[in-house]
Amino acid sequence: MTPTSEGGVQALPWPAWLDVLSAVFPPRGTVVVGAGAGNGPWVQWLRSRRASPVWLVEGDEAQYQHLLRHLPEGCDWTPRREVVASAPAPTLFYRASNPAENGLSPPERLRTLWPHLAEEGVVEVEAPVTLEALLAEAGDEANWLVLDCLPAAQLLQGGAARLGQLDVALVRVAAGENAGLDRAARHDAVDELLATAGLVCVHTRTERHPALAHALYVREPAGLRAQLAQARSQAAIDQQKLDELTHSLHGARQALEEAKDALARAIVAHKEERQSLAARICELEEALRAKQATARTAEVQGLFSVSARVAHVPIQLRMNTLHPEWIKVGEEVVEYASEKNAPLYLLGNEHGNFNRPPKVSQLPVDPEVDYVLSGRVGHAGESKPQIYLFQYDADRKLEALSTPVDGSGRFRLGFRTLPQAQSVVVGLRVAGTGTIKLADTTLRLVEDARAAGAEKVERRLEDIERQHRHDLDNAVRQIESFVRLQHYMGHETLVPEVHNWPVSPDFGVLLIELTEANAYDAVIEFGSGTSTLILAKALERVARRQQRSPSPLLSFDHLEEYQRKSQRGLEQAGLTSHAQVELAPLEPWKSDAGADFDYYACDQALRALKDRIGEGSPRILVVVDGPPASTGPRARYPALPKVMQALGPACGFHFLMDDYLRPDEQEIVKAWETELSEAGVTFRRTEFNRLEKKACLLEVDPAGVLHDDSGSE
């Protein structure tokens, strides 16, 4: 018996039936005969599921013009203005007052169903097309057929030779024996014809008139019912798990709100304690300054010492020079005689060179603070001494200030430490011959009274509050990103730890967004871990939605422990068909500029990947998250030159640099941009500065179609 639409099955709408069947028999290509104006349920379902390719056939000119205006953009849909018949011989095409009844059947034969149906025109078609010709044009990939016109059996007879390639057919039929209708329009005639092609009806649903219906035919019906039942059962299970995950998400959000409230209360409590904290900060800083000053001066060896006070702490400032042969140090006096009246610098550092930062700073200072350096020099000689103040960061001199001593040897120099200053050095410049009496020479370094006290404490408290707010905002972003990650990965995949050493949750979300938006042909990753699992899952989901095989993921790790752990994670998630983690020990590599690096032994695997993805202009994502910074300066630099050399200039690359908050990673990207510019290669930089560890995307396009609109997000 033909399955009917009675009972609970009637409640299942056509889109649900088609969704289930598309999971069992994915539509590789769909032919729709009788497409009408393009607003029928079958065309609407194909449009909503972005099915492709689709061939739309309509015989009426007015309906066809409407159809052209409803075609979706960006899809492989082919419209055909054709009349379909059982043979390529002249035939008549009838236009009815109801466009749904246009076709090969005269309207007068349908008046048993529609008494008021009128004929509005007849067109003689010299060369109609057959269903066999349409299916042959579509090729073997066309496995779905929608035949939404009468008489169906007659039209199917014209395609009998190719009906065997169909997996699903949806056909309009007459539900019973109706006077005036050809047998070729009846359900039983269609059943008999499609049965010879191995297709059996599994469901029918009547139209507005009970004598007309649409019948759904599928291949291999014996196993189909079990598959459909299993699919419905699995759908119910998945819905239950989705409900559970949604409930968990709601709980996580509620917990997040409670955490935000608790942190807000903690900030309020912190503000209430700021007065007592301010006093304690000053007390501890004074004690720490005394310990630092004493410890630092004890570490420096000097030719002689000068008495100094830092705030209220007395120290002995060790002095050195690049010309010890020009001075003679006694217990109370330092005598000097410079060669040819050359300037002689006596400096409070360990090497006597004012161009080099001190290894140990004898004068503890804070950045962006106003100070006053004052004192007296017990000097007698040919030229008046000059007092110098030098500021340094970790690598170089930042600033030099000077002031002469007055007639009594006294001086005063006000200055403000620079934001990047890490140390200061006091120097005394003399020339010719003379003496310095040590007992009469003293220095004093204090904070400017106008910038000290309450202003400093307030600034410190503002810094603490700002850091609290930053930590709170970051915690909220990371929790929200982790919830999004777990939801995307699905209930069957447990997201591993994602913080500190592994990638941060917000970086994991960025990986998903890039993969979903660009549908990469391959992904390369330097430094495996949690990100490997996220990338593999994203590639699988994109491929499943596009009904193709997932793009390959090739990840490298130089430590066997982490390589095995990452590979095991892929195996547990069932993602090893397209993703693998290669053990690639670090090996010496020299850049074109002659710089030496230790980088992954990845050349052979990259060449194999190139062979796998084939020719053309593939788009490739390269995630640069290794090796560790401890490997050496600019440790991640080789990623771009090695990948571009191995895969060739025809590829479009997206290089994503993690840990972009570190100066080393920023310098690497700048070096890449310089080399690409010199080579005439177009690129575009996007910085993701809101991420916890920041990231930078460098889109490299050898074809030169990118526009330079680099920016930040």
Image (cartoon, rainbow, N blue to C red):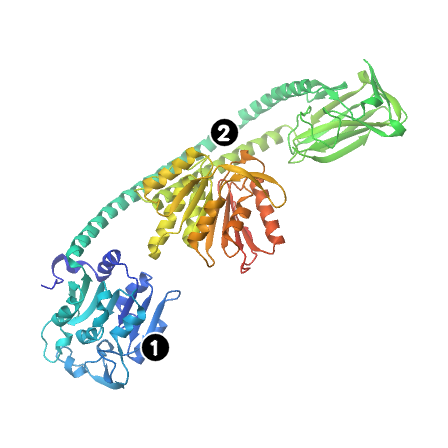
x then y, percent, for residue 238:
25, 47
Mark 2 neighbour class, 10 Å CA radius: few under 14, some 14 to 19, many 20 or more? few
Which mark identifies residue 272? 2
Q: Is 211 situated left or right of 329 in this image?
A: left
Depth order, front residue of 476/463: 476
How far apart in space, not on screen, are marks 2 and 1 (Cα)?
A: 74 Å
445 relative to 175, above or below: above
Q: Secondary structure at mark 2?
A: helix
Depth order, front residue of 9/316: 9
Q: Look at mark 1 in the image and give the residue it sits on.
A: 65
Q: Are marks 2 and 1 in contact (CB under 8 Å)?
A: no
Residue 665 visible in the displayed image: yes
Q: Secondary structure at mark 1?
A: helix
x then y, percent, for residue 493:
32, 41
Depth order, front residue of 355/400: 355
Q: Is 639 situated left or right of 256 in this image?
A: right
Which amino acid lies under the numbered mark 2 shown in the image of this protein? Glu
